[in-house]
Image (cartoon, helix red, strand yellow):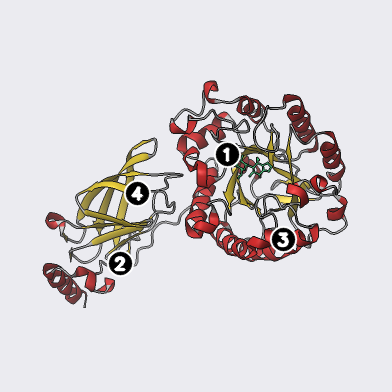
């Protein structure tokens, strides 16, 4: 049967209609692909792709893969006929490498461009058959999973949980995570790459990366699969560096999260299933509800949280609060509406956001009071005004951060980006280069945040 398919494949290819055959008809029984980066530069890369046929000999083949990040484009390839449809790349044999004996190899390569992350594809097919890299019944060695690294925030703290009003680590001790938020990944994807995340983990010693996935404003709603992939690849990049990843469903306008309820269910079902075994993931289900009652927010939360729990039962979930996650203060209310009517779920925290130049003593008083009643997470704050611009308020920012440190409340600062606004940590244009470490690339806000975040953590282990 296999011989017959090979023969059919040969005839078909000679006649030039390989594409008309069902994939199985021209199938290779097994294959292995080595995809290596031979060079990378800002926005571009070169990759070598070595394919080894582990099955029956083939004459005429097509190698395919789908990038987990949709930002890659093949610019120019060699040793194959290259094409791309969406995030799926295809390399078809050229005349001289048409035949691949069992054990035979073909060495291909291409230059590409990318936006966002540039993860390697993980699944390949040769003539429609998955390249599992094994022959016959041999199983590939089990994947031990990435090592978060001893001494990293995830390595020390492991799976987090809410205990009382605190965020606790695997030793059941309260901890505070200090880190940065991306800007909208639909606009600033180029800022999140190997060099910038290395700087965040190693120079800033950040404990977490908040991944701000806008839903509107050219975000998730325009390309659900693409944005889901980009979030997942940023989760992996954080994990590889031992950082927590806060997946932020960045609703903003409209302010009623129920407008995006179906999208939220679809998105969280997918990311929670995909990341369930990871220890570094925290879910934030609605960035900043506004113009909407606490009852409506609570109702949204009680529909989305079970979707997450069904796939990933033990992850911490953060719920946005009324008035742009101000616990209601920006709407003239306060924390009592949550204290008296909490979300019916366990292992959750409530978001509190502030912008230091706009939100001062009465907001700090609310947070201080609420901190003994509710588990709070400052999943976003700025050193500037609530517009994201204006002058940095050093005194107010310092008062806020001292308070958060004292209360062991975790935080993420808006933004780890080079946006042309004073809330950004990097000067405009930084993300077009590869230097994220020198002091010259930092804004005033970036310098202050880096000095606060990079001080040693005190994570108790017993
Ligand atoms: C701001 C960005 C700005 C963008 C605007 C609208 O800094 O570049 O044009 O959003 O998308 C928030 C929001 C956050 C805001 C930020 C500053 O969560 O999306 O980002 N802010 O205005 N809440 C309070 C302030």
**N-term mark: 1 or 2:** 2
Query: Does 450 sit above or below residue 2?
Result: above
Gap in angstroms between the C-alphas marked 2 and 4: 21 Å
**SS under mark 4:** strand
**N-term mark: 1 or 3:** 1
Find out if the beta carbon at label 1 lies less than 8 Å from the nearest ligand 1 atom: no
Gap in angstroms between the C-alphas marked 1 and 3: 35 Å
**Dot 3 crowding, Cα within 10 Å, few <14, some 14–19, many 20+:** many
Q: Residue at x 34, y 67 (%)?
A: 137
**SS under mark 1:** loop
Residue 172 appears in the figure:
no
**N-term mark: 2 or 4:** 4
**Label number found at residue 128:** 2
Gap in angstroms between the C-alphas marked 2 and 3: 42 Å
The reply, left or right, for residue 374 in relation to residue 221 is: right
Comparing marks 1 and 3, which lies closer to the viewer? 3
**Label number found at residue 73:** 4
Gap in angstroms between the C-alphas marked 1 and 4: 36 Å
Query: Does 139 sit above or below residue 113?
Result: below
**Dot 1 crowding, Cα within 10 Å, few <14, some 14–19, many 20+:** few
**SS under mark 3:** helix
Gap in angstroms between the C-alphas marked 1 and 2: 40 Å
Determine the residue located farthest toward the top in the rendered image. 440
Residue 58 appears in the figure:
yes
Comparing marks 1 and 4, which lies closer to the viewer? 4
């Amino acid at each position: 049967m296999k011989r017959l398919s090979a023969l059919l494949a040969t005839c078909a290819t000679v006649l030039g209609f390989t594409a008309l055959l069902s994939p199985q008809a021209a199938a290779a029984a097994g294959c292995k692909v080595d995809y290596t980066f031979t060079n990378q530069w800002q926005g571009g890369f070169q990759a070598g792709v070595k394919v080894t046929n582990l099955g029956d000999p083939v004459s005429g083949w097509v190698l395919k893969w789908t990038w987990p990040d949709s930002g890659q484009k093949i610019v120019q390839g060699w040793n194959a006929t290259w094409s791309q449809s969406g995030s799926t790349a295809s390399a078809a044999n050229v005349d001289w490498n048409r035949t691949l004996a069992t054990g035979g190899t073909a060495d291909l390569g291409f230059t590409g461009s990318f936006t966002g992350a540039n993860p390697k594809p993980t699944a390949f097919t040769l003539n429609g058959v998955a390249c599992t890299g094994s022959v016959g019944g041999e199983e590939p060695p089990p994947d031990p999973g990435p090592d978060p690294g001893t001494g990293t925030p995830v390595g020390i703290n492991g799976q987090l949980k809410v205990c009382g009003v605190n965020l606790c680590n695997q030793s059941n001790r309260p901890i505070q995570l200090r880190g940065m938020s991306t800007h909208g990944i639909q606009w600033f994807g180029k800022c999140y790459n190997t060099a910038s995340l290395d700087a965040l983990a190693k120079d800033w010693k950040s404990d977490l990366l908040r991944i701000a996935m806008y839903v509107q404003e050219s975000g998730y709603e325009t390309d659900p699969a693409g944005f889901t992939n980009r979030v997942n690849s940023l989760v992996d990049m954080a994990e590889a560096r031992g950082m927590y990843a806060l997946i932020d469903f960045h609703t903003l306008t409209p302010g009623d999260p129920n407008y995006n309820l179906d999208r939220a269910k679809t998105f969280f079902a997918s990311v929670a299933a995909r990341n369930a075994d990871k220890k570094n993931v925290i879910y934030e289900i609605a960035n900043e509800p506004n113009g909407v009652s606490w009852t409506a927010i609570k109702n949204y939360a009680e529909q989305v949280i079970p979707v997450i729990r069904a796939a990933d039962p033990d992850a911490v979930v953060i719920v946005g609060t009324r008035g742009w996650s101000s616990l209601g203060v920006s709407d003239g209310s306060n924390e009592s509406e949550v204290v008296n009517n909490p979300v019916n779920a366990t292992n959750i925290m409530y978001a509190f956001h502030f912008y230091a130049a706009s939100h001062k003593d009465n907001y700090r008083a609310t947070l201080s009071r609420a901190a003994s009643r509710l588990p709070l997470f400052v999943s976003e704050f700025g050193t500037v005004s609530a517009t994201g611009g204006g002058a940095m308020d050093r005194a107010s920012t310092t008062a806020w951060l001292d308070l958060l440190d004292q209360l062991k409340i975790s935080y993420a600062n808006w933004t780890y980006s080079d946006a042309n606004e004073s809330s950004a940590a990097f000067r405009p244009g930084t993300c077009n280069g590869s230097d994220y470490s020198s002091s010259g690339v930092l804004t005033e806000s970036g310098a202050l945040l880096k000095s606060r975040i990079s001080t040693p953590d005190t994570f108790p282990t017993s």
